[in-house]
């Protein structure tokens, strides 16, 4: 050993002491760091660790069914599969994006957009990239389980509606929730969830929609499932029973046929809606999955307005049906007195202008109604009589009665987006049009022309209510619903007798506009209406074109007093009078009602058979047919063609 | 030899602390790997520990003055070895750090042995400086001794090991009578260097892309959900979710399901903290503190300055390892790839620690002998 280092034993004790303090300080600081993580923020990290290891896969709750008043299934569910994309490992997702796009036939852009819209969701929450997987998709996912681990399937139930757009407007449809709906739901809805978008599906969404459950599994760091955890079961939605009668609805659908228009059948005693038809319609089954933005735009801009529920949203001039309002007002206020008559030469002049009666243009060439009293005027729907009555009543009295009969007010039916119609008045003209009321306007309004508009539902409620002596039940779609609103506007017995007599006469007396509708043994009563889309005189000036044809109305009921059923029918731009175009539909529905009541089996079909209802074809996203590469284990059952009785085990 | 140290002169307390820490490490390696493809790793670690104990006792018998005598030769040999690694080294994980040692069949990380040589070389150098205050000239010389191998290690690239050389120099210089003015100047320079590393326009020139990425993900862990930011985040989640009492042996979800990166090695403290909780951390860090304080005590009782420098070199290296590794585990420092001495799995690292402790024993055994 060389002693190059000498024997230097002077050690820097002070500095060594400092070194030990530094060591103690260092360990102390590190312990503080652990204290912060493990004691102060422990809960936060425990949650994060739990999210790491637990993957939640939603278990979709089936929606409740809709039954008709006899318990037949109108809307139920069919089993389907949704494709989930697991996003725990974004690097993996991005690596497989191209293969997923090819394999499932989803454009790459769509996939990327879906990923970006859901980027704020927690990573452990998968997203639905294809709500309705085809057999080919299922086969693709099954066969690529190992090389594309980010795909998962969940069984879901999709809505199954009756074919041919049966009851489609009233039922509505479901669709993926919008961002607005998610915001309004207080966290109940998440992107990719389905909820009612229109009709009863939307109105009763909270009842129909169940609560989704969760399947929870432990996953390791590479996303492989390790073990299951207790699952949270889905709570199915509740079913609702509608007041709709499948048989009457079917008759109404067939009878209206391909013509644009609407039919509403009500039980005026309870307000229950027995049938509700609006044509043209779209098949809600096409909406049950996903509809593309262009398709949606096309449907919205379609001039035939297939998405409009005409029975509650078509606000059109009621035409001569409104004369019942004018007549009731005249009898109740005795202005002019009951004995009032007019001579109808086919036209009348007021304020230096000629107003024609429809009879002036009648194809039979009668040109005149002669002298008429109230009863005859209602029977023959004489315009000149009601021009004079309207002028004597004045707009204020007319508006008072019409308003109490519900014109210009929503009926309060349990369907979204009902329209109120309009009853014009001097006040309204000043508010909305900023001009004075012209005295001559009341002449048009008294015959249901001019600015007055109403929906088919409003007219059914009104005529039913007047025939019931002034009791107007709130129309509703659920059977045996509680707390039904009722408007009472008592009409004197004498007036009711007179009016119902006249409406009975419309069908059952010679010269009535609904004479061809007579039904043996049934007191079918009603009032026709033929509303001009534009004035007769303007129409005469410009050449007669199909698109300016009149709207045909008929509101019928039975029996003549305190009716059990009232049916309102609108046939748009038919070019025919109300009694001819709309009357037969009303007659068919009322006949079917009595046939059913009298237990006549197999009779519930329409007698008038216009061409079958047109259903607007809707092509949904990714409907390109592809041949399944692998046969499915279970053949999917075909949708039932008609409503069927509820099986015992389904109850 | 003049001295004949007996077995009772060994630092049995130090050995007890050391063995306990190793036991904690083996337990946690078992817990982290038992159900996986790495099962049985704890036995390999036990084997490394056994070799380590033998080497430690062997090294303690050889008088450290003799070792210091050969310091220049050892130094030149290690420079040569580092050059050899760069030339023919075995590349693993994107860095040339390993060479195959014929016969052993294992890959040895040369830079671990180099650390030991630097400790020896610096002890020799500072022991030869006889002044009470360290002159600037001597400080620069010491800097050069560290500088050459440091550059070569950075070339591999192995930032972690290169960083460990810095505290060796700092602690040595401090004990050799570093002037406060120099200390201030060099601390400032150090701060500037660290600042430059974190400042993108400069770091782009001096750091490798993967190193820059580690820095960025340390500063912004959320931007790098699957890279090293993810590693830090998962480590913090593991530590935090352990709570005060821990999830229990074998029950750490972050550990067992593989969310903690390299949970048997660099991040073993994370796995330990998750399963044993704060109480376990208290035990582990308490043991490390006792170990380090015991080393300082041995330095205080060393026979001469050379022995003191050797022991404190070892203390500086181990202390720095503990600090950087544990700070990384709690997310307070970027990922550097520095293992936790005695607990982390790893052959070269374990052997280095035992050889270093062997030097300490060596100094202790000869404290009374003149």
Image (spheres, rainbow, N blue to C red):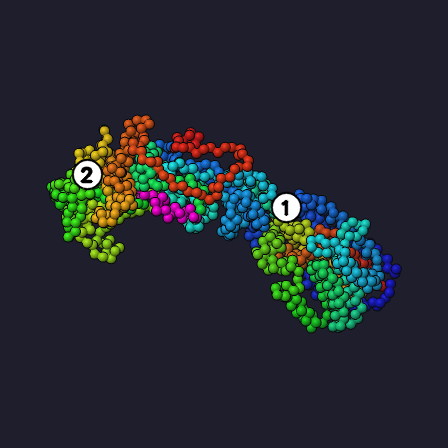
A299 or B127, which is in the foreground?
A299
Q: Main secondary structure of the magenta part?
A: helix
Can residue B218 be seen by looking at this rendering?
no
Q: Position of residue A75 (x, y in %)?
A: 40, 36
Q: Which residue is depicted at the point 69% across and 51% down?
A: B265
**Which quarter of the rendering shows the N terminus of chain A?**
bottom right
Q: Give the chain of mark 1.
A: B
Label 1 sits on residue:
B256
Mark pair 1, 2: CA separation: 94 Å
Q: Which residues are magenta?
A: A293-312
Kindly identify which numbered label has been placed on residue A364: 2
Q: Which residue is depicted at the point 52% across and 44% down?
A: A105
Q: Position of residue B287 (x, y in %)?
A: 70, 55
Q: Position of residue A79 (x, y in %)?
A: 47, 36
Is residue B158 shown left or right of residue A377? right
Kindly identify which numbered label has been placed on residue B328: none
Q: Please tell me how crowded label 2 is: few (under 14), some (14-19), or many (20+) other residues with Cα within 10 Å.
A: few
Nearer mark to the viewer, of 1 and 2: 2
Is residue A547 shown left or right of residue B310? left
Q: Position of residue B280 (x, y in %)?
A: 65, 51
A551 or A591, which is in the foreground?
A551
Q: Which residue is depicted at the point 44% across and 37% down?
A: A77
Q: Please tell me how crowded label 1 is: few (under 14), some (14-19), or many (20+) other residues with Cα within 10 Å.
A: many
Q: Are marks 1 and 2 in contact (CB under 8 Å)?
A: no
């Amino acid at each position: 050993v060389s002693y190059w280092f000498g024997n230097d034993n002077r050690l820097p004790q002070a500095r060594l002491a400092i070194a030990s303090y530094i060591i103690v300080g260092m360990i102390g600081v590190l312990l503080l760091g652990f204290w912060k993580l493990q004691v102060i923020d422990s809960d936060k990290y425990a949650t994060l660790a739990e999210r790491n290891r637990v993957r939640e896969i939603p278990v979709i709750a089936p929606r409740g069914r809709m039954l008709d008043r006899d318990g037949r299934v109108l809307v139920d569910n069919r089993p389907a599969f949704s494709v989930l994309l697991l996003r725990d490992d974004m690097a993996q997702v991005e690596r497989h994006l191209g293969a997923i796009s090819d394999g499932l036939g989803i454009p790459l852009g769509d996939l990327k957009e879906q990923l970006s819209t859901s980027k704020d969701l927690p990573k452990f929450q998968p997203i639905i990239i294809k709500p309705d997987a085809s057999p080919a998709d299922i086969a693709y996912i099954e066969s690529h389980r190992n090389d594309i681990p980010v795909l998962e399937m969940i069984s879901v139930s999709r809505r199954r509606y009756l074919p041919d757009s049966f009851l489609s407007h009233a039922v509505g449809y479901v669709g993926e929730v919008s961002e607005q709906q998610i915001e309004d739901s207080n966290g109940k809805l998440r992107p990719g969830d389905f909820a009612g978008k229109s009709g009863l599906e939307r109105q009763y969404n909270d009842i129909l929609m169940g609560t989704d459950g969760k399947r929870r599994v432990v996953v390791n760091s590479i996303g492989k499932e390790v073990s299951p955890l207790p699952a949270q079961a889905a709570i199915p939605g509740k079913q609702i029973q509608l007041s709709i009668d499948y048989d009457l609805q079917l008759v109404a659908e067939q009878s209206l046929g391909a013509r644009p228009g609407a039919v509403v059948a009500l039980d005026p005693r309870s307000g229950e809606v027995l049938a509700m038809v609006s044509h043209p319609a779209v098949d809600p089954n096409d909406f049950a999955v996903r509809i593309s933005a262009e398709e949606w735009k096309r449907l919205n801009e379609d001039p035939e307005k297939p998405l409009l529920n005409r029975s509650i949203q078509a606000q059109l001039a009621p035409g001569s049906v409104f004369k019942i309002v004018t007549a009731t007002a005249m009898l109740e206020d005795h202005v002019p007195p009951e004995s009032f008559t007019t001579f109808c030469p086919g036209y009348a002049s007021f304020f230096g202008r000629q107003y024609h009666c429809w009879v002036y243009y009648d194809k039979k060439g009668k040109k005149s109604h002669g002298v008429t009293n109230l009863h005859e005027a209602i029977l023959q729907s004489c315009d000149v009589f009601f021009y004079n009555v309207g002028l004597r009543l004045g707009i204020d009295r007319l508006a008072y009665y019409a308003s109490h009969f519900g014109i210009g007010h929503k009926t309060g039916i349990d369907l979204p987006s009902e329209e109120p119609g309009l009853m014009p008045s001097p006040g309204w003209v000043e508010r909305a049009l900023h001009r004075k009321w012209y005295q001559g306007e009341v002449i048009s309004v008294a015959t249901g022309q001019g600015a007055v508009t109403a929906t088919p539902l409003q007219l059914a409620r009104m005529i039913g209510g007047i025939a019931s002596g002034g009791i107007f039940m709130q129309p509703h779609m659920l059977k045996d619903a509680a707390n039904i609103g009722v408007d009472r506007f008592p009409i004197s017995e004498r007036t009711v007798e007179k009016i119902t007599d006249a409406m009975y006469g419309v069908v059952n007396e010679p010269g009535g506009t609904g004479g061809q509708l007579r039904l043996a043994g049934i007191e079918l009563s009603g009032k026709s209406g033929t509303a001009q889309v534009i004035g007769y005189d303007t129409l005469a000036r410009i050449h007669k074109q199909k698109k300016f044809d009149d709207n045909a109305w008929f509101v019928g009921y039975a029996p003549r007093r305190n009716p059990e059923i009232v049916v309102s029918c609108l046939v748009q731009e038919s070019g025919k009078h109300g009694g001819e175009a709309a009357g037969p539909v009303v007659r068919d529905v009322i006949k079917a009602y009595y046939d059913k009541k009298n237990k006549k089996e197999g009779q519930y079909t329409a007698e008038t058979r216009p061409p079958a209802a047109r259903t607007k074809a809707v092509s949904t996203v990714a409907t390109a047919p592809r041949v399944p590469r692998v046969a499915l284990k279970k053949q999917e059952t075909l949708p039932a063609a008609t409503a069927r009785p509820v099986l015992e085990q389904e109850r | 030899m003049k001295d004949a140290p007996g077995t009772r002169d060994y630092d049995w307390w130090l050995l007890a602390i050391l063995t306990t820490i190793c036991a904690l490490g083996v337990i946690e390696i078992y817990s982290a790997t038992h159900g996986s493809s790495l099962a049985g790793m704890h036995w390999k670690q036990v084997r490394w520990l056994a070799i380590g104990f033998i080497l430690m006792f062997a090294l303690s018998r050889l008088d450290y003055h003799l070792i210091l005598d050969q310091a220049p030769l050892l130094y030149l040999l290690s420079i040569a070895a580092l050059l050899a690694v760069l030339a023919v080294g075995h590349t693993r994980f994107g860095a040339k750090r390993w060479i195959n040692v014929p016969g052993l069949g294992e890959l040895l990380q040369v830079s671990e042995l180099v650390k030991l040589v630097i400790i020896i070389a610096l002890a020799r150098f500072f022991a030869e400086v006889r002044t009470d205050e360290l002159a600037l000239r001597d400080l620069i010389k010491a800097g050069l001794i560290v500088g050459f191998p440091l550059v070569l290690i950075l070339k591999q690239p192995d930032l972690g090991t290169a960083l460990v050389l810095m505290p060796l120099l700092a602690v040595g210089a401090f004990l050799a009578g570093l002037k406060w003015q120099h200390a201030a100047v060099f601390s400032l320079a150090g701060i500037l260097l660290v600042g430059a590393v974190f400042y993108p326009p400069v770091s782009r020139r001096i750091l490798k892309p993967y190193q820059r990425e580690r820095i960025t993900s340390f500063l912004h862990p959320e931007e790098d959900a699957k890279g090293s930011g993810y590693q830090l985040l998962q480590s913090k989640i593991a530590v935090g979710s352990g709570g005060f009492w821990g999830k229990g042996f074998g029950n750490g979800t972050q550990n067992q399901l593989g969310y903690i990166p390299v949970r048997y090695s660099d991040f073993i403290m994370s796995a330990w903290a998750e399963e044993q909780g704060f109480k376990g951390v208290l035990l582990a860090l308490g043991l490390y503190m006792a170990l380090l304080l015991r080393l300082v005590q041995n330095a205080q009782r060393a026979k001469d300055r050379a022995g003191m420098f050797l022991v404190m070199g070892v203390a500086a290296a181990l202390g720095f390892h503990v600090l950087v590794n544990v700070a990384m585990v709690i997310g307070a420092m970027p990922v550097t790839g520095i293992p936790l001495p005695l607990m982390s799995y790893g052959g070269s690292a374990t052997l280095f620690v035992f050889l270093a402790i062997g030097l300490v024993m060596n100094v202790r055994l000869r404290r009374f002998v003149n």
